[in-house]
Image (spheres, rainbow, N blue to C red):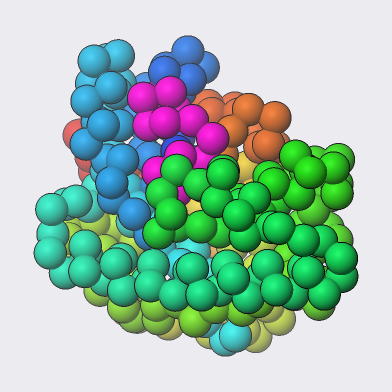
């Protein structure tokens, strides 16, 4: 099992990735991934296609999803791995989470218009594979296309984030709802890229404690959203709290992601991987 290459966090154009599920599967395979999960935002629509392509290519496939939640006033992402994508409660919960994205998107466009950037709602829609899942990433791609910024990283450095033009908060699911949905669908709940969240040490402690009490099992340690220094930082947190360790590139598309599919190093030593009991 230790010889297998895992990538348990990435996105297709069913949410905010650039490639279709089949294209993500093919890229994962080409990059040497053995065990792969597609974890689109708040959406299970790509799971069947991803599984079919992964199995055709000889990869182990793990059904996944990434759920947007609000905790202590910030957006946090909870990944569900090995979920049953036909579970009615999970499906209905994700549908409820997606509601409100169009309203938020129109507000984002209105805020950008105030600083002279016009036409962004229609522009973002051109980059959306699933209109129910219009997101800041789609706005960022349009803003690059329209010449407002050189790349999506520059967009997020200057727009669309808290305190910048175009930022509009959204109320997502709760931590309890996300963990309950994932566990109810037979899955494992994982805090995605914890190093991205801007919490105090006390808040992080409260988040990890609540997550564990609710039945959350794992955190991402190696992720494309962490720096190499953060791998060991969150490895130590996993050890301290008794969390399982997960990993994934958080790949969205060629040229957009810091780490390509399969591009992460192995997990630090002394951790129990989230896949330890998967029988691989």
Q: Which quadrant: the C terminus?
A: top left
Place of residue 32 in the rendered image (x, y in percent of width and height, measured from the top left): 47, 16
Nearest to the observer: residue 114 or residue 221: 114
Position of residue 8 relative to residue 185, above or below, is above
Nearest to the observer: residue 31 or residue 141: 141
Position of residue 156 relative to residue 250, above or below, is below
Q: Judge from the rendering whether residue 63 lies leftward or rightward of residue 16; answer left or right.
A: left
Residue 223 lies in the magenta-colored region: no
Nearest to the observer: residue 240 or residue 44: 44
Q: Where on the picture, by quarter, is residue 41?
A: bottom left
Q: Can residue 190 be seen from the camera position used here?
A: no
Position of residue 178 relative to residue 143, above or below, is below
Residue beneath the point at 85% across and 42% down: 147
Place of residue 116 in the rendered image (x, y in percent of width and height, measured from the top left): 87, 65
Place of residue 92 in the rendered image (x, y in percent of width and height, measured from the top left): 21, 69
Place of residue 180 in the rendered image (x, y in percent of width and height, measured from the top left): 25, 74
Residue beneath the point at 38% across and 72% down: 99
Q: Can residue 104 be seen from the camera position used here?
A: yes
Q: Secondary structure of the magenta portion, mostly?
A: loop
Q: Which quadrant: the N terminus?
A: top left
Residue beneath the point at 79% across and 53% down: 155
Residue 18 lies in the magenta-colored region: yes
Residue interval drawn in magenta: 13-25
């Amino acid at each position: 099992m230790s010889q297998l290459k895992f990538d348990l966090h990435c996105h297709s154009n069913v949410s905010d990735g650039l490639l279709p599920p089949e294209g993500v599967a093919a890229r994962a395979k080409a990059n040497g991934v053995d065990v792969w999960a597609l974890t689109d935002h708040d959406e299970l629509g790509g799971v069947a296609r991803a599984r079919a392509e992964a199995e055709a290519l000889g990869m182990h496939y793990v059904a996944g999803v990434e759920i947007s939640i609000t905790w202590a006033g910030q957006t946090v992402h909870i990944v569900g791995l090995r979920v049953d994508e036909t579970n009615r409660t999970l499906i209905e919960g994700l549908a409820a989470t997606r509601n409100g994205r169009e309203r938020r998107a129109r507000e984002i466009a209105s805020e950008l218009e105030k600083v002279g950037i016009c036409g962004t709602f229609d522009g973002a829609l051109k980059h959306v594979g699933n209109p129910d899942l219009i997101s800041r990433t789609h706005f960022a791609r349009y803003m690059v296309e329209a010449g407002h910024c050189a790349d999506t990283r520059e967009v997020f450095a200057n727009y669309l984030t808290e305190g910048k033009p175009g930022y509009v908060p959204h109320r997502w699911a709760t931590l309890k709802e996300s963990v309950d949905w994932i566990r109810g669908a037979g899955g494992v709940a994982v805090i995605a890229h914890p190093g991205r969240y801007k919490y105090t040490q006390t808040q992080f402690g409260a988040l990890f404690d609540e997550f564990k009490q609710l039945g959350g099992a794992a955190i991402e340690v190696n992720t494309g959203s962490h720096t190499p220094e953060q791998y060991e930082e969150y490895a130590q947190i996993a050890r301290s709290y008794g969390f399982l360790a997960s990993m994934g590139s958080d790949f969205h598309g060629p040229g957009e992601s810091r780490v390509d599919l399969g591009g992460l190093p192995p997990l630090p030593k002394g951790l129990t991987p989230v896949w330890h009991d998967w029988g691989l």
